[in-house]
Image (cartoon, grey):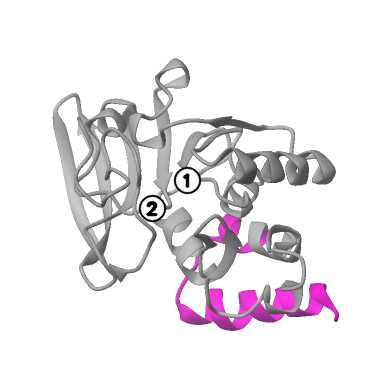
C-alpha cells in the first residue's frame, strides 16, 4: 500500500475537504505517518475516516476530529501544548510538528511505552510523555498556550482551566455516553474570564481520573 498517497488523499478529502483550513495542521497531517500509530495488522485502515482500536479499550481518534481539535486550539509555532490522553501518540506527533514543546499524559502505561517508542523512532524529540492522571494536568510545566483532551469529562476539569495561559485555548469533549458528548472550546481571556463555545457532537472514551470519571462511570473525587 502506498501510505504517502493515502495520506495525501486523506488530507485532501477528509480534512481540507471538510473545512479545515489551518495550513500548519494540514502540513502536519501530510507529514506524520498515521500507519505507524495504529495496531499491527490494521495499517491499511490508517487513513480511513474512522477511529481504530489501539488496545486496552482505547482508540485512535478519527483523523478529521483530531484536525478539528488542533485547529480549534489555534496551535502556533513556539507554543507550549498539553495533550491529555495521548493513546498511541498520533495527536502528540501532529502537535509536535507545529508547537515548540508538547507535554503529553497517558494513564495506561503500556500505551505510553509504545507511544514513546514511536516518538523515538521518528525523531520527535520535543514531546515529553508521562504516565499519570491527565484530568489533573501537568502543573510543573504550566501555563500552556493550548490544551487538548482526547477523552470526555463530566465537566471541564478545574485543574486544566488553571493551567491555561491567558489567551490560551482548551479543547475537550464534555458529557457522558455515546450520544451526550459535546466538543467544547474554552478561551481564557483573563484571570477569571473564560469564554465557552460548542463545536458539536462527538464520541470519545471517558476521561478517567480525579477530575474526570471513576472506573465505574461515576464522577471522580475532585
Mark 2 closeness class: few <14, some 14–19, many ≥20 residues within 10 Å: many
Mark 1 closeness class: few <14, some 14–19, many ≥20 residues within 10 Å: many
Residue plotted at (26% across, 42% down) = 187
Please report the bounds of the magenta region as a residue range: 1-27
Reading the image, the residue beneath label 2 is 151
Task: Verify CB contact (< 8 Å) between mark 2 and mark 1.
Answer: yes
Give the side of residue 16 with respect to residue 184, left or right: right
The kind of secondary structure element at disc 2 is loop
Q: Is residue 209 magenta?
A: no
Nearer the observer, 129 or 213 = 213
Please, is residue 98 above or below residue 46 in the view? above
Q: Is residue 14 magenta?
A: yes
Report which quarter residue 119 is drawn in.
Answer: top right
Q: Can you give x and y, in whole percent of width and height, for residue 170 in the image?
A: 33, 43
Ranked by sequence position, the earlier of labels 2 and 1 is 1
Reading the image, the residue beneath label 1 is 85
Q: Can you give x and y, in whole percent of width and height, for residue 112 in the image?
A: 62, 40
Nearer the observer, 161 or 165 = 161
In space, the residues marked 2 and 1 are separated at their CA atoms by: 6 Å
Q: Can you give x and y, in whole percent of width and height, for residue 171 in the image?
A: 34, 50
Residue plotted at (39% across, 30% down) = 137
Amino acid at each position: 500500500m502506498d501510505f504517502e498517497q493515502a495520506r495525501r488523499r486523506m488530507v485532501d478529502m477528509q480534512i481540507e475537504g471538510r473545512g479545515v483550513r489551518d495550513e500548519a495542521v494540514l502540513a502536519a497531517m501530510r507529514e506524520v505517518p498515521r500507519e505507524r500509530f495504529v495496531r499491527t495488522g490494521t495499517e491499511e485502515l490508517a487513513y480511513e475516516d474512522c477511529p481504530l482500536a489501539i488496545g486496552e479499550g482505547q482508540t485512535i481518534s478519527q483523523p478529521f476530529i483530531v484536525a478539528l481539535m488542533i485547529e480549534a486550539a489555534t496551535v502556533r509555532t513556539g507554543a507550549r501544548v498539553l495533550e491529555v490522553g495521548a493513546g498511541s501518540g498520533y495527536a502528540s506527533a501532529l502537535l509536535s510538528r507545529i508547537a515548540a514543546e508538547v507535554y503529553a499524559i497517558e494513564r495506561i502505561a503500556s500505551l505510553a511505552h509504545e507511544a514513546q517508542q514511536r516518538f523515538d523512532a521518528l525523531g520527535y524529540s520535543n514531546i515529553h510523555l508521562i504516565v499519570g492522571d491527565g484530568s489533573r494536568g501537568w502543573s510543573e510545566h504550566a501555563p500552556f498556550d493550548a490544551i487538548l483532551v482526547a477523552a470526555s469529562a463530566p465537566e471541564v476539569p478545574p485543574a486544566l482551566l488553571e493551567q491555561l495561559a491567558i489567551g490560551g485555548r482548551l479543547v475537550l469533549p464534555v458529557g457522558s455516553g455515546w450520544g451526550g458528548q459535546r466538543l467544547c472550546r474554552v478561551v481564557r481571556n483573563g484571570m477569571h474570564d473564560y469564554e465557552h463555545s460548542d463545536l458539536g457532537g462527538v464520541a470519545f472514551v471517558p476521561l478517567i481520573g480525579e477530575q474526570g470519571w471513576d472506573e465505574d462511570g461515576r464522577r471522580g473525587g475532585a
